[in-house]
Image (tube, rainbow, N blue to C red):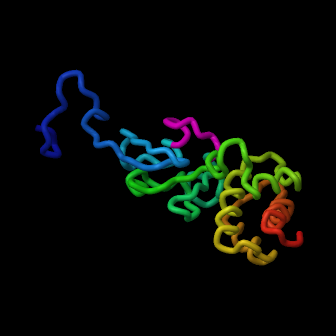
Amino acid sequence: MTAGGSPPPARGATSTERRPRIGLTVNGCAYESAADPDTPLLYVLRNELGLMGPRFGCGLGLCGACFVHVDGAVVSSCDTPLWSVEGKSVVTVEGLAPGDELHPVQQAMLDEQAAQCAYCVTGVIMTGAALLERTPHPDRAEVVGALERNLCRCGAHNRMVRAVLRAGGGDA
């Protein structure tokens, strides 16, 4: 027996063979992960699924570079443990629009030339898309408030605000 009271793994078995798989839906596709349940969702998205949209920024959920939607809510994937999204729907920037289409916020970001280094852009897009889902035609104050958790180190924040306003059909 091990210290935790469970039998030792069979000869040649790895710890992932004993670990229960965690099921979730990512960008509309069912997926099961054998990663440790405490693994940050960001690591599973990037390392197991190859989805490079969510980025590692601060590792504390404070910058927005890793934002994804979990059951429609904006969530920082860098500090969200895998176990907490079991059975839930996760959407990354790659799955925001069907096929080769762009979500209106993605298109507006291009049209407004809103990205400079683009490190924060995917998180901003995810936040903007969630805002438009709740408030289809936000005003400037609502957009600025929604993007408060997204840190842009390049100073392109005002262009990003204009892009979200444009996607919502508002005046920039």
- Left or right of 158? Residue 42 is left
Image position of 47 with respect to 80: above or below: above
Image position of 85 with respect to 45: above or below: below
Image position of 125 with respect to 12: above or below: below
Q: In which quarter of the image is residue 21?
A: top left
The residue sitting at 72% across, 72% down in the picture is: 136
Image spot of residue 121 (x, y percent): 74, 52
The residue sitting at 48% across, 55% down in the picture is: 89
- Dominant secondary structure, magenta: loop
The residue sitting at 44% across, 45% down in the picture is: 30
The stretch of residues the image draws in magenta is: 45-54
Instruction: Reply yes or no: does residue 108 show up in magenta.
Output: no
Instruction: Reply yes or no: does residue 47 show up in magenta.
Output: yes
- Left or right of 9? Residue 151 is right
User: In the rendered picture of this protein, how many numbered marks are placed on residues?
Assistant: 0
Image spot of residue 128 (x, y percent): 71, 63
Image spot of residue 108 (x, y percent): 82, 56
Assign the N terminus to one quadrant of the image.
Answer: top left
The residue sitting at 64% across, 52% down in the picture is: 96
**Residue closer to the observer: 58 or 169:** 169
Image spot of residue 148 (x, y percent): 70, 69
Q: In which quarter of the image is residue 31?
A: top left
**Residue closer to the observer: 17 or 7:** 17
Assign the C terminus to one quadrant of the image.
Answer: bottom right
